[in-house]
Amino acid sequence: MIDPPLESIRPCLEGVVPSLVATCGPDGAPNVTYVSHVHYVDRSHIALSFQFFNKTRANILVNPRATVFVIDPNTAARYVLHVRYLRTEADGPLFERMKAYLAGIASHTGMAGVFKLQGSDVYEVLAIEHLRGPELPAPPGRYGLLAAVRAVSTLLASATDLRTVLDDVLAVLDSELGARHSMVLLIERSRARLYTVASRGYPASGVGSEIPLGHGIIGVAAREGTAIRISHATVEYAYSRTMRERAALDGVEGIETEIPLPGLATPGSQVAVPLRVGGCAVGVLFVESEEDARFSWEEEDALEAIAAQLGTTIAWLQQAADSSEEQTQATESQYLPRGAPVTVRHYPVDNSVFIGDDYLIKGVAGAIFRKLVRDYVEKGRTDFTNRELRLDASIRLPDITDNLEARLILLVRRLQERGPEIRIEKTGRGRFRLAVERPLALVESG
């Protein structure tokens, strides 16, 4: 056991105050240098950033013992960590967490061109020495984090509908954690992208917007399956909402098929936490703030606990919707389509769908919507089930782990944003209805 415990001095490991590392060369000559961040790995390990092949690096490769001097930014308490070098990681979750955090520090200090992480040097903490001296009183402890986890746990325990539970969870994060800006994204592995299924605190919902896997803090958290927290804005991990992906469809150049990603123009703090099912990342829970250093490791830990439960709930609700035996008698729609036909145009190259001249959705969700409209136009059908969509070869759905229910949420919300003429209404578990107020005309392009 380390006394005091390493987790008890975590304020020292936030990179607020630079730390000192002392090493010794093979000739016995000491060397002391500053490091920008001492990273907490677990209860008995830390990691230091390897940025240059300097004297410190040369020394630990020969003599792995070192001491690290850290300061608590709140109380000015000083500690010396006696450590032993174990290994260097040049990729993977730890490396990506440190890389993102270092990028934030570099941007904040005007040294973005200098702080380039080459590796994460992992050390075992052998002992911690508390240096006596004048100290300030410790600030009041954080309250409400466990209450937020409890509130989400209670909510998820009674969840029956994925369409509402996502919004409810983000509302709890707002009310209990003060995380006003947040979103949930799920992974579409067949296209190596994440798509937004819920958001809160932004002028536009951005439901259906996409991020490539491995791009920015959200994409990296999903690819590596690890939480990533940035305490200062960084250009390297910022999302440009002025960039749009364009596709040439039906011989027409420049048809825009990208929904703007929601997000703050100048975020100061961001946390991206993967949603896991069976040890595999299936999505990301993301929060951000305009305030620097808004989220500490305590919020990160709370968000990880929430994300673990949310990932399991999403998987359970998807499975229930796909395999439900609930029987409801199909009834005729109460809506009698009137007026001029609405043209639904489908582009098979990427399953993009337009209603009139307005882009709706693409990918798997686009293929689903095309199937619904086709069956409505050709057969007059309005009632459908998740199970039949899963079995329909024309849609080419990915495997069962790719969330079908989430695709339907995209359609529901994108149609709601467009207007009342076409809607998808839930009629039971795993069952829904296409409600149409104007005649539809399906046009296949390309």
Image: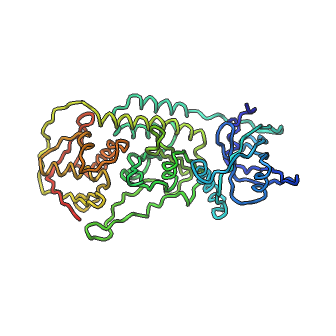
Front residue (pair 151, 321): 321
Q: Position of residue 184 (x, y in %)?
A: 43, 45
| In-image side of 377 versus 210 (left or right) | left
Q: Position of residue 50 (x, y in %)?
A: 69, 55
Q: Quadrant of the C terminus?
A: bottom left
Report whether residue 409 is seen: yes
Q: Position of residue 177 (x, y in %)?
A: 52, 38
Residue at 23% over, 59% down: 346
Residue at 20% over, 57% down: 344
Examine the image and state in which quarter residue 354 appears.
bottom left
Front residue (pair 290, 320): 320
Front residue (pair 79, 22): 22
**In the rendered picture of this protein, how many numbered marks are placed on residues?**
0
| In-image side of 49 versus 409 (left or right) | right
| In-image side of 385 versus 30 (left or right) | left
Report whether residue 291 is seen: no
- The extreme right residue here reads 28
Which colour assignment does the render follow? rainbow
Front residue (pair 232, 212): 212
Residue at 68% over, 53% down: 49
Examine the image and state in which quarter residue 330 appears.
top left
| In-image side of 135 versus 372 (left or right) | right
Q: Quadrant of the N terminus?
A: top right
Q: Position of residue 388 (x, y in %)?
A: 23, 41
